[in-house]
Image (cartoon, coloured by chain):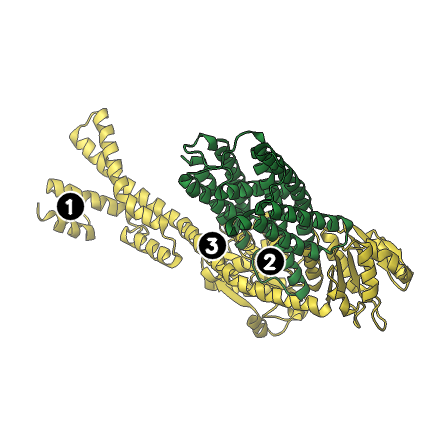
């Protein structure tokens, strides 16, 4: 059984194609998918940047065809490019690569904005949908859980999501480097446009205390203030509002700066030099650049914020190298678990086989030696102990192999060496019995291959 | 002999390493562990000071190494108290390592102590404790001032922090500076007064004109000026931070440096 993954993302397909695969009812779609005989378990992730389906299957070639067919026929809506073109836009991951890819996606290493926090929630939603639909079995369940744990480790052990990369979040982050908490702070918003609103949303997420909106058109100021629970003011009230303000966000049109050094200096004096954070995202600038020279004033314009954001993006890229190492570790751990899981049937067969032989031999000898009940019990214990000791090492090796390829090869070897897939398993048991029989009794033997073996073994006696 | 001192030193060292790891990795669990390490270290050092008189020979509290250990011990306690109200993640590593060096240094020094100033009665003990507490609090104000100047400079340069350790916000650092300066000045004043009373009890005069006393009084007057400016709102936070750093450097020289130089 293998883990397989097929999908397309922002790097491989344009949005016009990706949107054709956007799915609202994931559960229904997944149930339809697992109805196909080639597919075992399934989980589907559908976000604005990617559509991915992860499945388990016994035959990867058959599953690949089934998945592609499913993608094009059952998943898509509207007109698609030619199938060959769609196939080019899709990527296919199998086994180790699929596991690694999923962990990278959950940890936001594969995201358009590295370290973005939304993807983990989306992956969790995808897992929940698959569980609710009853199509997520033990393997993908475990894989998803490990994916969440990997994402948590990456978040906690690297700085991949530490520094913000959007202008609005950079502004909030800077505010938090200046102020202890935003809850008791007052923000003065000059303008009522989209940029101001975006910054206000980001500040609101961090519990901004008081909001005051100043705008030339008071109706717009009132509309924004109403939406965010603030008060609206006219531009003529600026000087009165500034001393009570901790943060100024400005984005209004017009010629020349609204806030000059003199105005800010006067406000700072009345604030007893408490720090004032000013964000000027207006073009042309609304706050005179000289304001930054004042000791307690921190002025950032759009270019400054974008520069910080770009530096933070680079920092995240550097941190992603550490994140890759964590993904690698977790992938190896999961593969170890998968091999152990796949070893279970072989180990069970091996034990059954050994026990069958043991029981057959015990009953044969017990009958001949006319043992009483106590002696039979002792013989039972003795043989069980011998078998357990002999089987311990091979079973441990099968169970503890962490490398997937080596583990699978070892399982194959074990099945072949112990003839676990042989339909004449029961016959060979009796062959072995006969061999030992012949060894000890130099009597008759039966069977073909094992007879000759036993004859050789028996020769010295 | 110095079991508690060694335990305290080991705990401080572990707390320092934990705090650095906690900030660099970053690992919040390590930071919590480091805070516990500091608290336990301070508790062990409290036990060490409480049992100091049982040592033979008992080290003098006026011994430089012992005084340094007392100052850092009180500094750790103040910092832990402040941390319960203000987020101060960057404070732990320097404090823990300083406390480790001081606690370990005290064990080495006290084992070599021979001649000691006789300290009997409540006044000398009160003087040493109050003056040390004042120095510890003003030291914290200085440390907060250092961090403030670093952060202020970075924010003014409009650069993203490249270092992994995130320092507290400017406002938090300024608050620590204000609280520590006020508390430190108060304790220093009491320390100076009890010192004068101790001198009077010993030599019959409040002021002998020694270099140590003169420089300490000058340092106290400087701090009086700093506190006055701070509360009159005449300084910006950056100026207050710079003053706290300069003031502590002067105070250290007045209390320790003058004695070493002379």
Q: Which residue is at the front of the view, A384 or A9?
A: A9
Q: Chain of mark 1?
A: A
Q: Which residue is at the front of the view, A120 or B56?
A: B56
Q: Is residue A356 visible?
A: no
Are discs 1 and 2 both within one chain? yes
- Pointer 1: what residue? A445
Quarter occupied by residue A444: top left
In front: label 3 or label 1: 3
Are discs 3 and 1 both within one chain? yes
- Report x, y in % for residue A145: 53, 49
Which mark is first along the chain, 2 or 3? 2
The chain whose colour is green is B
- Pointer 2: what residue? A161
- Report x, y in % for residue A242: 83, 57
Q: Is residue A224 left or right of residue A183?
A: right
Q: Is residue A305 left or right of residue A331?
A: right
Q: Is residue B224 above or below residue A311?
A: above
Report the residue at 32% width, 42% height from top. A352
Pointer 2: residues within 10 angstroms few (<14), some, or many (20+)?
many
């Amino acid at each position: 059984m293998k883990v397989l993954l097929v999908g397309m993302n922002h790097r491989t397909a344009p949005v016009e194609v990706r949107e054709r695969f956007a799915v609202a009812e994931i559960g229904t779609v997944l149930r339809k998918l697992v109805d196909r005989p080639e597919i075992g378990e399934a989980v589907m992730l559908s976000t604005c940047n990617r559509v991915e389906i992860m499945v388990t299957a016994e035959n990867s070639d058959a599953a690949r065809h089934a998945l592609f067919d499913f993608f094009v026929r059952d998943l898509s809506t509207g007109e698609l490019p030619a199938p060959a073109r769609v196939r080019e836009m899709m990527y296919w991951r199998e086994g180790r690569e699929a596991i690694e890819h999923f962990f990278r996606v959950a940890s936001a290493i594969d995201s358009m904005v590295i370290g973005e926090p939304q993807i983990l929630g989306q992956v969790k939603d995808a897992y929940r949908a698959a569980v609710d639909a009853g199509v997520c079995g033990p393997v993908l369940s475990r894989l998803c859980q490990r994916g969440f744990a990997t994402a948590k480790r990456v978040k906690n052990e690297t700085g991949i999501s530490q520094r913000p990369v959007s202008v609005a979040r950079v502004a909030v982050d800077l505010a938090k480097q200046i102020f202890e908490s935003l809850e008791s702070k007052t923000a003065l918003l000059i303008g009522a446009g989209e940029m101001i609103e975006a910054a206000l949303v980001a500040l609101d997420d961090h519990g901004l205390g008081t909001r005051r909106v100043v705008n030339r058109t008071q109706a717009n100021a009132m509309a924004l203030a109403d939406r965010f629970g603030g008060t609206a003011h006219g531009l003529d009230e600026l000087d009165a509002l500034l001393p009570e303000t901790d943060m100024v966000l400005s984005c209004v049109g017009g010629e020349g700066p609204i806030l000059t050094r003199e105005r800010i200096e006067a406000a700072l004096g009345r604030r007893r030099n408490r720090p004032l954070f000013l964000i000027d995202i207006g073009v042309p600038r609304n706050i005179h650049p000289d304001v930054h020279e004042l000791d307690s004033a921190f002025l950032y314009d759009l270019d400054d914020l974008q520069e910080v954001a770009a530096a933070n993006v680079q920092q995240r890229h550097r941190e992603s190298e550490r994140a890759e190492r964590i993904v690698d570790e977790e992938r190896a751990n999961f593969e170890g678990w998968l091999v152990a899981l796949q070893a279970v049937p072989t180990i069970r067969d091996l034990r059954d086989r050994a026990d069958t032989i043991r029981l057959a031999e015990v009953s044969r000898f017990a009958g001949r030696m006319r043992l009483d009940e106590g002696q039979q019990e002792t013989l039972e214990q003795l043989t069980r102990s011998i078998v357990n000791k002999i089987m311990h090492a091979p079973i441990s090796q099968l169970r503890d192999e962490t490398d997937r390829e080596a583990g699978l090869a070892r399982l194959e070897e074990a099945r072949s060496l112990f003839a676990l897939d042989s339909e004449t398993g029961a016959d060979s048991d009796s062959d072995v019995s006969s061999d030992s029989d012949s060894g000890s009794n130099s009597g008759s033997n039966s069977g073909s291959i094992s007879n000759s073996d036993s004859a050789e073994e028996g020769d010295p006696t | 002999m110095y079991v508690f001192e060694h335990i305290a030193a080991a705990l401080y060292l572990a707390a320092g390493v934990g705090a650095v790891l906690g900030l660099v990795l970053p690992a919040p669990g390590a930071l919590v562990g480091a805070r516990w390490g500091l608290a336990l270290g301070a508790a062990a050092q409290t036990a060490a000071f409480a049992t100091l008189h049982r040592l033979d020979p008992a080290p003098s509290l006026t011994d430089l190494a012992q005084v340094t250990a007392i100052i850092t011990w009180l500094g750790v306690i103040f910092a832990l108290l402040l941390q319960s109200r203000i987020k101060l993640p960057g404070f732990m590593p320097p404090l823990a390592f300083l406390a480790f060096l001081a606690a370990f240094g005290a064990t080495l020094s006290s084992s070599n102590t021979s001649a000691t100033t006789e300290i009997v009665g409540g006044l000398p003990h009160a003087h040493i404790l109050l003056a040390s507490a004042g120095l510890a609090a003003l030291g914290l104000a200085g440390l907060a001032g250092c961090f403030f100047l670093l952060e202020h400079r970075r924010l003014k340069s409009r650069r993203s922090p490249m270092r992994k350790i995130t320092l507290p916000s400017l406002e938090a650092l300024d608050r620590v500076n204000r609280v520590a300066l006020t508390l430190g000045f108060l304790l220093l004043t009491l320390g100076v007064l009890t010192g004068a009373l101790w001198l009077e009890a010993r030599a019959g005069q409040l002021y002998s004109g020694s270099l140590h006393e003169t420089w300490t009084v000058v340092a106290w007057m400087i701090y009086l000026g700093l506190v006055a400016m701070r509360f009159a709102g005449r300084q910006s936070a950056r100026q207050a931070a710079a003053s706290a750093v300069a003031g502590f450097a002067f105070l250290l020289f007045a209390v320790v440096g003058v004695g070493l130089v002379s």
